[in-house]
Image: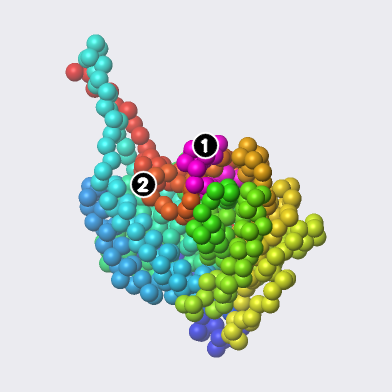
Amino acid sequence: QTMAHSKTLLVLENFIGGKFVPCSSYIDSYNPSTGDVYCRVPDSGKEEVEAAVKAAKAAFPVWSSKSPLERSQILNKLADLIEHELEAFAQAESKDQGKTITVARTMDIPRAVYNFRFFASSILHHTTECTEMSTVGCMHYTSRMPVGVAGLISPWNLPLYLLTWKIAPAIACGNTVVAKPSEMTSVTAWMMCKLLEKAGVPHGVVNVVFGTGAKAGEALVCHPDVPLISFTGSTLTAQRITEKSAPHCKRLSLELGGKNPAIIFDDADLTQCIPTTLRSSFLNQGEICLCTSRIFVQRSIYSEFLKRFVAEAKKWKVGNPSDPTVDMGALISKEHLEKVRSYVKKAQAEGARVLCGEGVDALALPTGNQKGYFMLPTVIAEVKDESCCMQEEIFGPVTCVVAFDTEDEVIERANSVKYGLAATVWSSNVGRVHRVARRLQSGLVWTNCWLVRDLNLPFGGMKASGIGREGAKDSYEFFTEVKTITIKH
Ligand code: NAD
């Protein structure tokens, strides 16, 4: 890069103890829709993490002794401030991540706002247990305390949405935090830091350290004064975090990948099922952990479904994410795009049929986006259950459609992957819907819908999709330590 070029770059700084602090080295961050470097992200390591943990520790005694109501008011204020700048946040998220401006405006940023409002409210409504043993004159009760400094590590697909889903409950419960967003999508977290003081968040309660997983992330995971780590990301990274944190016996919450099935029975309402399954396959370029990537269709409706599904997928418009008429933006990085494409090639080599998208249809991009990381929604049929395309998380706009005959068979096939995050069942038979939902190995089962969430209820996966759940009660339990107290009278 020339000097003139680097002057125009956005340069982020860490946020430690209520102050923005520069870092000694930086990482380039790309605009996925143009392929240009547009931002420089601190390449933090042990030293920066040490300073952030120190600030968080110092802020803990005062913050943890505030009443839930005081903390709730601050969270609500922060929600209002982010909402006030919703458009600026949405523009930044779209530019940084490649997602469409429409998705950023209607999903990512509104949800980040709601995360703070939701935990501002729910923190006021928890109760504890009490029991009595009259024969020995004792009563017992439980009390919940914040744990201390929480380490929060988040991925690049829903940047502010997922980071605030951790920050909000952590600080609502009275913890202080050191957060590390993905090095590929750090801008909106940095923008949020600018609002903390105005919202009344005391210095040191929220610290954000930017950088890579290997350096900044691992320094946080290995820090002896960070007793709990809440992580959302890939299963591989979770294994590493588990190993690295084991010597400290840290409390871990792990929200990981998925290989989510949609099961479509012959009595499904296809007018609802087809548009929803398109969204569940391709929303946010298929870069949502909950996205469908294995579609099992009962044989009697298989051809009809496939024909209609492919015809609709071909209508999805891919292009400049800032164009509000576009349905799909750019993938996060060149490397990720290549990885996603390589799965389509592997499927073809195995004899599967690619019905639309990658390698089949032409992708026409606007002049300014020729170097962006785009691909078309891709539907693959006749792929074997053992294929890597049916077993591994692709995390892009690629979905496989296969036929099945019986209920027992499809449940077994749907369960035959290492993951267990989210499943979708389509049928108008109520009995069947309940039966199948109970037998699926999946933390979430949506029937006749997708991505309808009540934040009160547990969110998370089983098997390789994670350990622990997040939600009103679940996050409260994760971010607090429970104590049983016995009083003899
Ligand atoms: P990733 O695991 O590569 O990175 C996630 C975060 O961990 C990033 O901030 C990264 O810098 C950090 N990290 C990487 N190595 C680390 C290490 N050794 N120690 C500490 N931190 C480290 O995941 P990604 O590619 O950013 O995100 C995509 C993955 O996230 C997909 O697998 C997706 O399914 C999953 N995901 C899961 C959920 C869920 O709620 N279950 C939600 C969104 C995404």
Q: In this view, does 417 lie to the left or right of 316?
A: right
Q: How many labels does the image show?
A: 2
- The residue that appears at 57% across and 77% down in the rendered structure is 319
Is 435 part of what is drawn in magenta?
A: yes
Q: Which residue lies furthest to the left in this view?
A: 489
Give the residues drawn in magenta, as a range: 418-439
Asked if the beta carbon under badge 1 is closer than 8 A to the nearest atom of ligand 1, the reply is no
- Res 160 → quadrant: bottom left
Is 482 part of what is drawn in magenta?
A: no
Residue 253 placement (x, y as % from top left):
48, 44
Asked if residue 32 shows in the view, the reply is no
Q: In which quarter of the image is the C terminus?
A: top left
Q: Which of 100 and 263 is in front in this view?
A: 263
Q: What type is the residue that disc 2 sits on?
A: Asn
Q: Which of marks 1 and 2 is in front?
A: 1
- The residue that appears at 35% across and 62% down in the rendered structure is 113
Q: Nearer the viewer, residue 215 or 183?
A: 183
- Res 227 → quadrant: top left
In the structure shown, which secondary structural element does the residue marked by tag 1 occupy? helix
Q: With respect to residue 224, does 333 lie above or below?
A: below
Asked if residue 130 shows in the view, the reply is yes
Question: How far apart in space, not on screen, are marks 1 and 2 (Cα)?
Answer: 24 Å
Q: What type is the residue that disc 1 sits on?
A: Arg
Mark 1 vs mark 2: which is more N-terminal? 1
Residue 197 placement (x, y as % from top left):
29, 65
In the structure shown, which secondary structural element does the residue marked by tag 2 occupy? loop
